[in-house]
Amino acid sequence: MGNASHFALFDLTPDFRLDLEGLAARYRERVRRVHPDRFAGASEREQRLALEESAQLNEAYQTLRSPSRRARYLLALQGEEMPQETTVQDPAFLMQQMELREELQELQEGADLGGLAAFKRRLGQAQEQLNEGFAACWADPLRRDEAERLARRMQFLDKLSAEVRQLEERLDD
């Protein structure tokens, strides 16, 4: 497999918009061929290569199925990689994040499952807006700064979504 791009591993054209069901089907097909169990009687070298290929497929799949990770990966393919942790220089966005976190804290304190469901829907809509914005600009070199800004915002909302899932699990118990 070598250093093939994550997209090439699944015979996909690099793009932000992906058919996630098609990606999952291609992943299952490819990972089945290199599953370590299929190489139990093979040489040590073949077992190692199958394990490496399986790990590469897993990494590629995890990256491509996540919009924020896919966005960062596409930007990296275009040249320089975005720094992993970068401060967002957008006061309005930062204020919105603080307000969302405060709202989430209130929902947690009130154990409000209905409110949490509504919050999760709004968060999903915000994520979809960011995804659409990124899809519209990532391939234009003149809009690189905008694409990076949107990718950073996607990361913030991903973290908030993870917190929402954790809270849902705690409140469901």
Image (tube, helix red, strand yellow):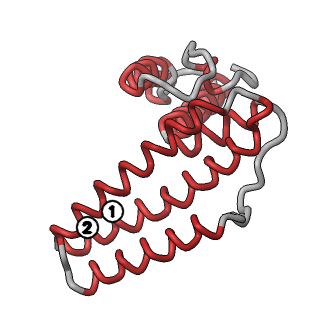
Asked if residue 20 lies left or right of residue 9, the reply is left
| Dot label at residue 165 | 1
Quarter of image, res 101? bottom left
Where residue 23 appears, x then y in whole percent?
A: 44, 23
Tag shown at residue 71: none
Q: Residue furthest top?
A: 11
The residue lying at 72 percent from left, 36 percent from top is: 75
Q: Cα distance, mark 2 to mark 1?
A: 5 Å
Q: Nearer the viewer, residue 49 or 140?
A: 140
The image quarter containing residue 167 is: bottom left
Total number of numbered labels?
Answer: 2
- Quick one: label 2, few (<14), some, or many (20+) residues within 10 Å? some
Residue 93: percent from left, percent from top: 57, 64
Q: Nearer the viewer, residue 64 or 45?
A: 64
Quadrant of the image occupied by residue 13: top right
Residue 68, relative to residue 70: is it above or below? below
Q: Please state the horizontal and vertical placement of residue 58, each as a whole percent of the image.
A: 53, 35
The kind of residue tagged 1 is: Arg
Judged from the image, the secondary structure of the residue bearing numbered disc 1 is: helix
